[in-house]
């Protein structure tokens, strides 16, 4: 690039360049609004939907608090109350908290990174619509009295078929399924987006702390969601086909669910908190006009918290009869996680001390966040101490703790973020005068609602009770909590009114009202910034004078559209130098329709309407095939000028392809699901007196060898087909071997008498077999697809490469499964 | 003001006392730390410091202070946990508590005398003596929690969890199910009554007895027993000496010796008994007991007879 102080491009810009950029990124109008895939459009939808679910779950909570305001109340019948508290927790955790942090990332992150969009826009759109349809269907069940009522973590055996015979639990499992899709898709987007599409010059060290927190969170999702996916699949298999994973009488174990769920559930709360912490770290410097103190320590703390959070899950099970060793280790880890958390808290306090604190809306909410979250964190350390937890567990003390950390740790930063980043929507700030009232009501309401719960818990009030006796001494505390909830609701209502009022104001330029330092505050439009900025520091808007004008006039990278389509730069993950031009897909009906088909299929199947379900399923499959068909097409231009004298290749293949790395993320998710199923088999085996249990047999000697040979052969053939991209026979032969291997496996097990309903161990073996079958069911059509696309040119072989990668993963799992079974 | 019925902070045995003191310590330290942090947060509004001081704050607050404190807490917590009474079945009295939706099946075994007794929804303990509880569940997850005496333990079908209780003072201590178990989780409570050892032995001997056969004076009592049999209450409820084998519902052999009905939902009284039998769904919607289609006269007679089952 030209010397220091020179920009990648010079003025004047050629005529038509800006018009081409605008044209490529034009936002759709009318019905076509549903085809939008741009992150600014999808981000807005996502934020609005997540906030809507927050309000809905909040109303459920108000009803619950009104029921508990006085003892012996009959405002809500117990069955209704139990559905309400289950829905409150489920909607808050799965339809509000996770989607909200994803929504904020979708909306904000590309701008912060100087990218034009996320790397897989149609995937984001699909993930959003799947979430929206799935979530909407889920809350409608409440109107029919079919909402789940087993608590938000749905412990079996209560949620098994015997004790929950209705469809309620199946709807919960369904709803969770959509969130799983959304979350994994989000994780792929975030990891690839953060590692591949940062603007030139933005090394990882210069990346905003919020982006770091999202990178950590995306990695956490990759490892945390698979056990949930496995667990929910197993519960549905138990309910639908009587595979008794959690039924003690047939060798199952209810505690197995707890392991699988909380291995997800504990990282989940940090998945919720870390983005909020990242937001605070990104807002605070602007609010106090000084860089974040101990920035590197804060980033290291994010990584530490993210990693350590995977060691804590058993602290939700201290009363479940675990052994002393694991109890002690988990207790120690649960206390240890307070250390990196404390580093962040003190970094924020130190930043406040160094800078000038003004009482504006975002600052108020950040101060509130610090106070409420720290109190919640302290009660968290208290319950990390096992003896105390033996009293506090499952009492209102825990309800108090969890609300202090979640309301303090997510809701307060969310409000702060809303007040802070509102100008990005239409240039206007929200009302400072109303914000003081909102803060007062929310802060007071939070404390008045939840502090008394510490006391009622220690006075013996258990969780999840629809009423209590007047002789228990909990009356005044509950009444206070209800008053607090009403105050909190008042604050939220006032905020919502101001939000709507502000969003309806006419568009204007925001002019960076907080004088923030990060790139999302550059003038943005549908195409993000006019050119992608060359960044030279962690606070570009503070350190690089003239950056705003230069970027807006097109003097930085990629000021137009080379191919006439939507594009963004791919940069090296370490040096942040431009590598190639990524052409992004434009608006399309396919993600919307595919999501509609997916949601409709699963919802109608749950309602046992098979014919209607398959119609939607067909829609999903057809749109998916059309979508994949159009992806990975060879591109017209071979090289593109993104700056003066700098030409980059258009697209990339092999290990430089962003889709290759996205496939690797899927491989890790897949392997983690497999590991969860393997854990299931191990856990159940350990509880048996004899293994295999009486009556169960594994296939005898020649079969596993045959299967292993066929699997390995299919992998070799798949690899060969990658080397000989023009020929179709290696891929078809690989497919044949794969199908034959699975058929052999399935046949051998059935011949040996595998009966999954008889006992839980057999069910676990069957689950591994079924997972293998799922891979075959995806890869076999993939073979046909790849072969049918015919001319597999070297230039556009991403689908082939990705398929081969997934192939090796599947074969690896099959072989691992064989070894596992033979060793047991 | 009545003393709290179910409070962690009103302990009645050595374990309860230890846990209560531990709670106060945690609360005191937590409150102190919170006040310091809150002061630092609010002081930031007025103070301005140099960069090196601010880094120092992060190191002190984030590392130098928490690490030793948490290490000390971990050590103290482990030490306290070790001081608690660990499940120990070498006690004289064994009680098997099996949780059902939504009542407690209680089986006593005096290992010294071999005496066994089956009851429901109430435990009695001899003051000053350790008693071993074997906890399990017949259906879904439940948890046994009597805050005045000990921490809680989950009751998992297919597993047996041990808990050793030790009451130091006589009294009545309430416990409640602490793991969500369905519709009436809120109304699944029990009483633990600690009495002098002599009184305990007498009580246990009484509980082990069957109902004495009909030297029942009074036509009403005789009638009550007839109603019980005719209405087939014995299909679910055992009254030893009258109807055996009913295990779906609580054992009623000595129902009138207990303080509450329906697992703590109603205080025991004649009116409560009649109301409960006539329509259990009124007090405990979702309870598994069907309403009794009995004439008022039959209900009265039944209640009269049940009241004699002390």
Image: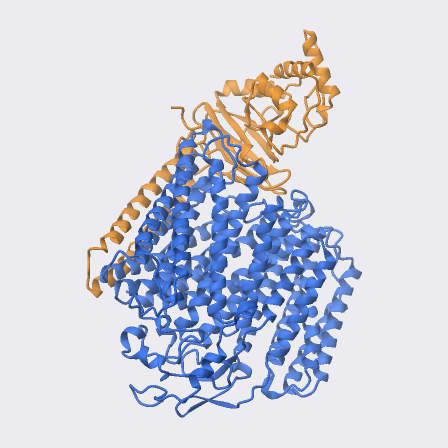
Chain colours: A blue, B orange
Judge from the rendering whether residue B18 lies leftward or rightward of residue B304; answer left or right. left
Q: Where is residue A732 in the image (x, y as percent from the top left)?
A: 72, 80
**Which picture quadrant has residue A726?**
bottom right
x and y percent of residue A630 in the render?
A: 62, 78
Q: Toward which corner of the image does residue A631 lie, by quadrant?
A: bottom right
**Does residue A808 appear in the picture of this structure?**
no
Vertical position of residue B68 compared to residue A483: above or below? below
- In the foreground, B163 or A562: A562
Q: Residue furthest bottom?
A: A645
Q: Measuring 40% from the left and 68% from the top, which residue is drawn there?
A: A212
State the residue at coordinates (29%, 87%).
Answer: A4
Q: Position of residue A286 (x, y in %)?
A: 29, 65
Q: How many labels does the image show?
A: 0
Quadrant position of the N terminus of chain A in the picture? bottom left
Q: Which residue is drawn at 72% across and 17% down?
A: B227
- Give the image location of residue B246, x and y in percent: 70, 28
Q: Is residue B268 visible?
A: yes
Residue A786 falls left or right of residue A66: right
The residue positioned farthest toward the right in the image shown: A751
Q: Nearer the viewer, residue A589 or A471?
A: A589
Quadrant in which the C terminus of chain A is drawn: bottom right
Residue A699, quarter of picture? bottom right
Say which of A401 and A680 sits in front: A401
Residue A569 relative to residue A181: left or right: left
């Amino acid at each position: 690039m030209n010397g220091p102080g020179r920009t990648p491009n010079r003025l004047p810009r050629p005529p038509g360049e800006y018009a081409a950029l605008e044209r490529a990124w034009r936002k759709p109008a009318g019905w076509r609004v549903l085809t939008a895939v741009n992150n600014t459009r999808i981000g807005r939808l996502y934020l609005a939907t997540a906030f809507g679910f927050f309000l809905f779950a909040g109303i459920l909570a108000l009803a619950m608090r009104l029921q508990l305001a006085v003892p012996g109340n009959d405002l809500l019948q117990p069955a209704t109350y139990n559905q309400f508290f289950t829905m409150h927790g489920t909607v808050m955790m799965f339809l509000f908290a996770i989607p909200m942090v994803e929504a904020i990332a979708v909306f904000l992150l590309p701008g912060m990174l100087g990218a034009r969009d996320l790397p897989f826009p149609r995937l984001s759109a699909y993930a959003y619509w799947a979430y929206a349809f799935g979530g909407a269907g889920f809350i409608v069940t409440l109107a029919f009295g079919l909402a789940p009522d087993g608590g938000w973590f749905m412990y079996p055996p209560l949620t098994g078929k015997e004790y929950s015979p209705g469809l309620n639990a199946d709807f919960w499992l369904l709803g969770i399924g959509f969130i799983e899709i959304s979350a994994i898709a989000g994780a792929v987007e975030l990891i690839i987006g953060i590692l591949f599409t940062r603007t030139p010059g933005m090394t990882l060290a210069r990346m905003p702390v919020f982006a770091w927190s999202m990178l950590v969170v995306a990695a956490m999702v990759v490892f945390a969601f698979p056990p949930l996916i496995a667990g929910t699949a197993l519960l549905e298999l138990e309910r639908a086909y009587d595979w008794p994973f959690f039924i003690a009488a047939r060798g199952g174990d209810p505690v197995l669910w707890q392991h699988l769920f909380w291995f997800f559930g504990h990282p989940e709360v940090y998945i919720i908190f870390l983005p909020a912490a990242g937001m605070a770290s990104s807002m605070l410097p602007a609010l106090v006009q000084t860089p974040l103190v101990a920035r590197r320590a804060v980033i290291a703390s994010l990584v530490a918290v993210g990693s350590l959070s995977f060691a804590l899950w058993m602290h939700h099970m201290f009363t479940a009869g675990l052994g002393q060793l694991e109890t002690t280790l988990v207790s120690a880890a649960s206390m240890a996680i307070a250390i990196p958390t404390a580093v962040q808290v003190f970094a924020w306090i130190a930043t406040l001390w160094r800078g000038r604190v003004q009482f504006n809306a975002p600052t108020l909410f950040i101060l509130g966040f610090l106070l409420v979250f720290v109190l919640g964190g302290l009660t968290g350390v208290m319950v990390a101490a096992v003896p105390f937890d033996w009293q506090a567990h499952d009492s209102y003390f825990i309800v108090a703790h969890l609300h202090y950390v979640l309301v303090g740790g997510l809701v307060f930063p969310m409000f702060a973020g809303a007040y802070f980043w509102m100008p990005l929507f239409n240039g206007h700030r929200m009302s400072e005068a109303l914000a003081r009232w909102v803060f007062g009501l929310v802060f007071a309401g939070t404390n008045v609602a939840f502090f008394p719960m510490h006391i009622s818990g220690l006075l013996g009030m258990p969780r999840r009770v629809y009423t209590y006796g007047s002789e228990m001494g909990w009356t005044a505390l509950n009444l206070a909590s209800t008053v607090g909830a009403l105050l909190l609701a008042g604050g939220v209502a006032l905020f919502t009114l101001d939000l709507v009022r502000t969003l309806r104001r006419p568009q204007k330029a925001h002019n960076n009202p907080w004088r923030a330092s990060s790139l999302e505050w550059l003038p943005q439009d549908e195409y993000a910034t006019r050119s992608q900025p060359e960044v030279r520091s962690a606070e570009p808007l503070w350190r690089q004078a003239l950056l705003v004008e230069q970027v807006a006039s097109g003097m930085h990278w990629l000021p137009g559209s080379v191919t006439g389509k939507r594009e963004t730069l791919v940069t090296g993950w370490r040096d942040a130098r431009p590598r190639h031009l990524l052409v992004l897909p434009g608006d399309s009906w396919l993600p919307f329709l595919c999501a509609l088909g997916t949601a409709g299929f699963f919802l109608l199947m749950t309602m046992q309407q098979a014919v209607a379900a398959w119609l939607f399923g067909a829609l999903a499959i057809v749109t998916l095939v059309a979508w994949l068909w159009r992806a990975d097409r060879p591109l017209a231009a071979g090289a593109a000028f993104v700056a003066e004298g700098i030409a980059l290749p258009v697209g990339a293949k092999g290990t430089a392809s962003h889709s290759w790395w996205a496939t690797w993320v899927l491989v890790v998710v897949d392997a983690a699901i497999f590991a969860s199923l393997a854990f299931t088999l191990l856990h159940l085996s350990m509880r048996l007196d004899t293994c295999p249990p009486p009556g169960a047999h594994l296939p005898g000697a020649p079969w596993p060898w045959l299967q292993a040979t066929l699997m390995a052969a299919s992998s070799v053939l798949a690899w060969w087909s990658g080397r000989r991209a023009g020929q179709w026979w290696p891929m078809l032969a690989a497919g044949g071997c794969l199908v034959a291997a699975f058929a052999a496996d399935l046949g051998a097990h059935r011949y040996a008498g595998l009966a999954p309903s008889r006992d839980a161990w057999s069910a676990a073996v069957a689950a591994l077999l079924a997972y293998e079958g799922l891979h075959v069911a995806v890869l076999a059509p993939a073979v046909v697809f790849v072969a049918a696309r015919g001319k597999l040119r070297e230039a556009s072989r991403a689908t082939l490469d990705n398929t081969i990668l997934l192939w090796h993963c599947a074969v690896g799992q099959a072989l691992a499964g064989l070894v596992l079974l033979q060793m047991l | 003001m009545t003393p709290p019925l179910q409070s962690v902070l009103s302990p009645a045995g050595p374990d309860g006392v230890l846990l209560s003191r531990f709670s106060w310590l945690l609360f005191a330290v937590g409150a102190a730390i919170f006040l310091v942090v809150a002061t630092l947060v609010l002081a930031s509004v007025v103070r301005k410091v140099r960069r090196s001081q601010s880094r120092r704050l992060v190191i002190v607050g984030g590392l130098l202070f928490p690490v030793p404190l948490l290490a000390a807490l971990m050590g103290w917590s482990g030490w306290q946990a070790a001081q608690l009474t660990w499940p120990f079945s070498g006690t004289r009295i064994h009680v098997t508590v099996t949780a059902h939706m939504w009542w407690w099946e209680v089986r006593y075994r005096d290992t010294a005398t071999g005496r066994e007794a089956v009851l429901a929804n109430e435990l009695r303990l001899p003051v000053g003596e350790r008693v071993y509880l074997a906890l399990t569940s017949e259906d879904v997850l439940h948890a046994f929690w009597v805050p005045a005496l000990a921490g809680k333990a989950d009751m998992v079908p297919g597993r047996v969890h041990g808990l050793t209780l030790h009451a130091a003072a006589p009294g009545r201590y309430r416990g409640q199910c602490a793991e969500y178990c369905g519709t009436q989780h809120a109304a699944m409570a029990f009483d633990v009554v600690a009495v002098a050892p002599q009184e305990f032995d007498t009580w246990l001997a009484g509980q082990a007895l069957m109902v004495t056969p009909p030297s029942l004076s009074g036509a009403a009592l005789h009638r009550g027993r007839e109603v019980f049999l005719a209405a087939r209450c014995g299909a679910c409820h055992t009254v030893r000496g009258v109807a055996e084998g009913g295990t779906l519902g609580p054992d009623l052999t000595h129902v009138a010796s207990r303080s509450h009905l329906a697992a703590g939902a109603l205080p025991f009284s004649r009116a409560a008994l009649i109301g409960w039998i006539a329509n259990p769904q009124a007090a405990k919607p979702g309870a598994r007991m069907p309403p009794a289609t009995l004439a008022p006269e039959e209900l009265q007679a039944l209640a009269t007879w049940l009241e004699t089952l002390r």
